[in-house]
Image: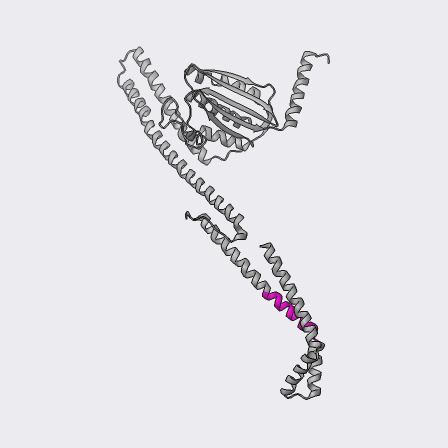
Amino acid sequence: MALRSALISILAVAAGYGLLTFLTRGIGGETFQSLVLKVLQKLGMSAERAAAVYTRLLVNGRVLFVLGGFLLMFFLFYLLALKRMTRYLNSVSDGLDRVLSESPEAIVLPGELEPMAEQMNELRRRLSWRAQQAVESEQRKNEMVVCLAHDLKTPLTSVTAYLTMLDEHPEMSQEERVKYTHITLEKAIRLEELMNEFFEITRFNAQDITLEKREINLSIMLEQLEDENYGLLNAKNMTCVVDVQEGLLMLGDPEQLARVFDNLLKNAAAYGNEGTQILIQARGGNGGITIVFTNEGPQIPQKKLEMIFEKFYRVDDGRSSKTGGAGLGLAIAKRIVELHGGAISAVSDSKNTRFIVNIPVDAQVAKGESNEKERKQRQKRNPAK
């Protein structure tokens, strides 16, 4: 397009130059002068009057005629270029309309606009994919809400039944009363868990996660995970081994990152085999930190592995008290990691499933903090210094 516009401009200048040359030579030539004088005399002018008019208008005003002719030629070529440009714009407009339409036909633009046509086709593919993902996510959410609503009935009915029995039978023995009270409490706790899942869905749809970054020690944060989730691990007779590099410091939101690692550990515990080990590893280097959660359990098929970070997606096709959840933990983890400029992925084989988190870190800040930590440790060992 730019080349054609330049060529049209050159043609306009060349045509103007040719017109200038023609008029300069023509007006000054005897043939042109004689022709004009004859025309003026036929119109009733005398020879002297015709000569005076010719001199005043054509000889003395020659520059104006040349300028007028040049502008006329330039205007004509400009209209030609504008018409071509308008055709380009109309083609682009039609292409944009197709991007927004559901037509399967590929977008085709004039040869000069082929790169733009390729970008439009790619944009349409991405928009179509995102629309499909949104529909599938909404469908999964609706199915999850229906399942939750159904699951709420069971513990609620049990709680009502046991409380009614306790209320209507005051003569019940203390041992039986304690037994049924304990069962009622378990059902109430399960009811609370289901209600929390409802709130989790609502928060995820309405929440805009914002980060409050400060310097944090990832090593300490990961080491605390095992203690904080002891009850969860003990329920499945699982152990957790934390193998992290000391002094892994970075700028980040400690609450949100703790949420990421907590979700990953709970996911590993939920889908790992009973009596197995969960391994948490973390290493720094090359301007970033890599954290890996590994659990022993069934292999996740590749097709499901590609969708595992989608909201409301669950690896298992049904809900159970064993795995529970609204299918938001990994989606939330992905969002938080990406807000930190990092990435999260998953790989699975016949023995292990690994979730890998890569987070960039400010090397200068980390190095400075490590030096400060070493200095304080030296001071503790040698107070006199």
Queried whether the magenta region covers residue 214, the answer comes back as: no
Queried whether the magenta region covers residue 67, the answer comes back as: yes
Left or right of residue 191: residue 278: right
Q: Which of the two residues, 369 or 272, is positioned nearer the viewer here? A: 272
Report the label total.
0
Q: Quadrant of residue 25?
A: bottom right
Reply above or below: 60 against 190: below
In the rendered image, the quadrant that contains the C terminus is top right
Residue that protrudes farthest toward the right in the picture: 385
Reply above or below: 210 against 30: above
Left or right of residue 70: residue 235: left
Q: Residue at x 67, y 17 (%)?
A: 376
Left or right of residue 56: residue 194: left
Q: Which of the two residues, 262 or 280, is positioned nearer the viewer here? A: 280
Q: Quadrant of residue 58?
A: bottom right
Prevailing secondary structure class for the magenta stretch in the rendered image: helix
In the rendered image, the quadrant that contains the N terminus is bottom right
Q: Residue 235's x, y, as percent?
A: 41, 16
Q: Which residues are magenta?
A: 61-76
Reply above or below: 11 against 195: below
Q: Which of the two residues, 302 or 319, is positioned nearer the viewer here? A: 302
